[in-house]
Amino acid sequence: MVGKKPIILLCLAALIVIAPLVIFYGGYFGCVDCVAAKAIEKTGYEPWFGPIWEPPSGEIKSLLFALQTAIGAIIIVYVFRYYNRQAKGKKDE
Amino acid sequence: MHIMEGFLPLEWCLFWYAIVLPVVAYGVIQIKKITDKNPELKPLLAVSGAFVFVLSSLRLPSAVTGSVSHPTGTGLGAVLFGPIVTCVLSAIVLIFQSLLLAHGGITTLGANIFSMGIAGPFAAWAIYKGTTRAGASTSIGIFFAVFIGGLLTYVVTAIQLSLAFPIPTFGEAFYKFMVIFAYTQVPLAIVEGILTVVMFDYLLKLRPDILEDLKVIRPKIKAMI
């Protein structure tokens, strides 16, 4: 059974994530690391080393980020199922 | 908080590597020790690492600046296993991201491990221990631990960049980078805190015995008597 607490908390989290999309509607959501990099370049600094390999496009980068999320999610679900079965086994005893 | 590849002068890259490497090495030994002692902890360790994988891959919009940043996800591992072990988990994720995603970098890896793997988790761990010992509930303890730990990671990144680029002065550079990083992170740190509380509650329901073993929660025996 899922209690009320996690549902309320997850809705709250979703709200905080969705709110900026409404507040800054039509705005440009730039990545914060790139903003920092630009601020550094403004001081006249030039990066002395570039990435060894870069995803060929933004789409491929998104794909790899999605892959990272998926790997993590699969591991979490797998272990929770394992724990769940253990918990059930204990109850049956 | 990822300082991009090549965006730190060589001496600072080496400086952060020198601080971080012994901690990571010690963390690997610690992981071996605790999993040898109690193999039951391996799945929980995997969950903590996977949680970092998931949260650090979620690039969320921030209501404060309209930029996109990501939570760190290190709070769960820090509360369960302590900051030293979490440092290793963060290092794995940061290496993955720097090699496959061109997110962060190999030269800046030391600095990034320090902010995400040492500073944030250490604060989270200390705050959790402090608040719960002072009588706060685990949910409150986790939330503030993760919130402040997540935020501190970004404050440390701002400090690292202002140290490397104190132009015109350290103070002004710090203000500039704080606006970029830390302000953006405030709502995301709240989201991270909430998600970690939900995760922790579920773990608490499934395996309270393991959490007691790790001394994350106190045994319930007293309450029963």
Image (spheres, helix red, strand yellow):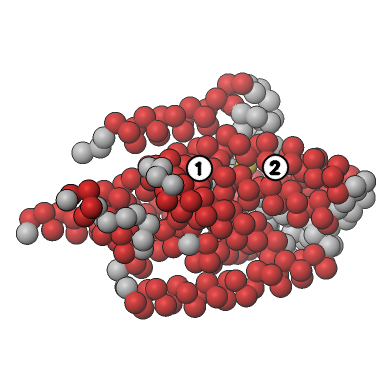
Give whichever of discs 2 and 1 has the lower sequence position: 1
Direction from residue A10 to residue B24 in the image, left or right: right
Instruction: Identify the residue at horizontal 44%, vertical 47% (top origin).
Output: B134
Q: Position of residue B178 (x, y in %)?
A: 74, 41
Instruction: Check disc 2 and report its element: helix, strand or loop.
Output: helix
Of badges 2 and 1, nearer the viewer stands 1
Which amino acid type is shown beneath numbered disc 1?
Phe
Please name whichever residue, A32 or A66, is drawn nearer the observer in this view of the structure.
A32
Give the answer, above or below, for where B171 lies relative to A8. below
Which amino acid type is shown beneath numbered disc 2?
Phe
C-alpha distance separating marks 2 and 1: 19 Å
Instruction: Check disc 1 and report its element: helix, strand or loop.
Output: helix
Q: Are marks 2 and 1 on the same chain?
A: yes
Instruction: Identify the residue at horizontal 69%, vertical 47% (top origin).
Output: B155
Please name whichever residue, B175 or A49, is drawn nearer the observer in this view of the structure.
B175
Direction from residue B207 to residue B122 in the image, left or right: right
Please name whichever residue, A8 or B213, is drawn nearer the observer in this view of the structure.
B213
Q: Position of residue B34 (x, y in %)?
A: 39, 73
Q: Position of residue B57 (x, y in %)?
A: 54, 49
Q: Which residue is mark 2?
A: B181
Instruction: Identify the residue at horizontal 63%, vertical 62% (top origin).
Output: B113
Give the answer, above or below, for where B58 lies relative to B76. above
What chain letter is assigned to the residue under label 1? B
Question: Would you call the spot at circle 1 few (<14 residues within 10 Å), some (14-19), or many (20 or more)?
Answer: many
Direction from residue A83 to residue B19 in the image, left or right: right
Image quadrant in which you'd find residue B212: bottom left
Q: Which residue is mark 1?
A: B144
What chain letter is assigned to the residue under label 2? B
Question: Would you call the spot at circle 2 few (<14 residues within 10 Å), some (14-19), or many (20 or more)?
Answer: many
Instruction: Identify the residue at horizontal 21%, vertical 38% (top origin).
Output: A1
Direction from residue A23 to residue A8 in the image, left or right: left
Query: Label 1 near label 2: C-beta < 8 Å?
Result: no
